[in-house]
Image (cartoon, grey):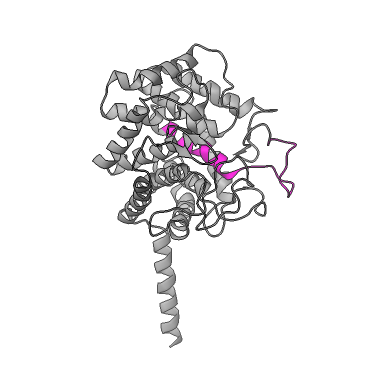
């Protein structure tokens, strides 16, 4: 009887182990589709302004990040409805940006990531008139300190990468590198990246001597998510012989190693990566971006599969089991902000001030989890 019992336990444990080390692509796609459909049903008018504490146009960064995710979904599962939804959004804004073509704020020109994707699917010079006017000025102006907060790396860096490929112009790759390295090594006292910890301070307000309540450095989850997500996306865009590619690979690997150490037991990450008691609790947007970056690293041979696959799948399963509602709503999503206290407390049912960027992060993560091979 005891032998039968232990055999049953062994079979049960083995079944759980196999389930945690594999992924059902069909299920991942269904989960992505469910979350996306919730949003599309809620926002049928792509040009409708977003009203929270004030009214904003729908081509701001929060919505632009959503469309990044939608285009990632469209890439693995091309569907006319997805393409048309993104195209309607671009058309409703005349393929332009908040604050116009003179803006240097990456939050404003983040929308160009999707504009370029749509252009590549159906080229028409008129579509990128505003994007070209906005981005070309960076090639002829000397300053490199525009990305003085790390979120901007994700909003802006892939646009430079896409423009470099589109125009076969390495000046975009070089300018992108100069701006990235200024954020990494110069802005603030000595740059916003701490090589010792493999993580980033959100901006100059949070580098030392600023500390979290437990005395540790302040590493905000979603901020670091923006960086590793930007590195993954940029590497996916630029050619293999592009200049400075190894820098981005090395930084992605260092970040992944640092993030692996601080993953919660339930699979999520806390909003404060080195102070689990500072508004501790699961948070979905940072977790999704970490999944995206790590899964990209595994899929492209930059990260060891055996080491990181359990981390990735544990996080993905946590998001869909504990964050994804039956109707597609995503819980445990921190509202806009720049540090752990913003948008607190989080919960399964709490609706954040913007629902779009969290979904975009989730779709980006799902697109790379879907590509994992078993």
Answer whether residue 230 is magenta in the image: yes
**What's drawn in magenta, residue-wise?**
206-235
Give percent across and percent down for residue 2.
46, 86
336 or 144, which is in the foreground? 336
Q: Quadrant of the N terminus?
A: bottom left
Q: Is 93 situated above or below 84? A: above
Kindly indicate the quadrant of the structure image that contains residue 194.
top right
Task: Please indicate, yes or no, whether residue 79 appears anywhere in the rendered image.
Answer: no
Which residue occupies the extreme top position in the image?
A: 140
Where residue 73 appears, as percent x and y from the top left, is 34, 43
Say whether residue 33 is left or right of residue 187: left
Above or below residue 271? Residue 178 is above
Residue in the image at 36% along x and 54% along y: 31
Nearer to us in this view, 146 or 172 = 146
Q: Is-magenta flag for residue 183?
A: no
Q: Name the residue nearer the viewer: 247 or 236.
A: 236
State the count of labels: 0
Q: Residue at the spot x=35%, y=30% of the render?
A: 92
Q: Looking at the picture, does residue 5 appear above or below residue 167?
A: below
x, y percent for residue 117: 34, 30
For residue 242, say whether it is visible.
Answer: yes
- Relative to residue 158, is residue 285 depicted above or below? below
Please provide percent x and percent y for residue 265: 56, 59
Task: Classify residue 3 as left or right of residue 80.
Answer: right
Q: Residue furthest bottom?
A: 1
The residue positioned 44% from the left and 70% from the top of the image is 13
Residue situated in front as seen by the camera: 263 or 253: 263
């Amino acid at each position: 009887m005891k032998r039968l019992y232990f055999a049953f336990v062994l079979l049960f444990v083995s079944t759980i182990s196999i389930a945690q080390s594999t992924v059902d692509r069909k299920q991942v796609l269904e989960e992505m589709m469910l979350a996306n459909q919730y949003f599309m049903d809620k926002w049928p008018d792509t040009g409708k302004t977003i009203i929270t504490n004030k009214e904003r146009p729908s081509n701001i960064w929060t919505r632009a990040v959503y469309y990044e995710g939608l285009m990632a979904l469209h890439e693995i599962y091309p569907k006319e409805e997805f393409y048309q939804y993104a195209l309607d959004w671009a058309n409703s804004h005349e393929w332009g940006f908040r604050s116009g073509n003179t803006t240097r704020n990456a939050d404003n020109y983040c929308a160009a990531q999707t504009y370029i994707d749509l252009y590549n699917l159906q080229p028409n010079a008129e579509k990128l008139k505003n994007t070209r006017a906005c981005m070309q000025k960076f090639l002829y102006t000397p300053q490199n300190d525009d990305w003085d907060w790390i979120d901007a790396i994700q909003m802006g860096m892939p646009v430079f990468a896409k423009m470099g490929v589109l125009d076969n112009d390495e000046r975009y790759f070089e300018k992108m590198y100069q701006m990235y390295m200024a954020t990494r090594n110069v802005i603030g006292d000595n740059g916003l990246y701490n090589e010792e910890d493999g993580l980033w301070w959100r901006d100059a307000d949070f580098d030392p001597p600023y500390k979290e309540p437990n005395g540790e450095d302040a590493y905000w989850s979603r901020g670091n998510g923006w960086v590793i997500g930007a590195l993954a996306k940029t590497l996916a865009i630029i050619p293999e012989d592009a200049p400075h590619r190894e820098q981005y690979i090395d930084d992605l690997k260092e970040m992944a190693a640092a993030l692996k150490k601080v993953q919660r037991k339930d699979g999520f990450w806390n909003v404060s990566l080195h102070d689990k008691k500072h508004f501790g609790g699961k948070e979905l947007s940072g977790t999704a971006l970490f999944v995206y970056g790590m899964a990209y690293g595994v899929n492209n041979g930059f990260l060891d599969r055996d080491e990181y696959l359990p981390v990735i799948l544990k996080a993905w399963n946590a998001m869909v089991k504990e964050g994804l509602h039956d109707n597609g709503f995503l819980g445990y999503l921190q509202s806009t902000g720049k540090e752990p206290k913003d948008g607190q407390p989080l919960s399964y049912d709490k609706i954040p001030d913007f629902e779009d960027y969290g979904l975009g992060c989730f779709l980006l993560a799902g697109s790379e989890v879907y590509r994992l091979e078993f």
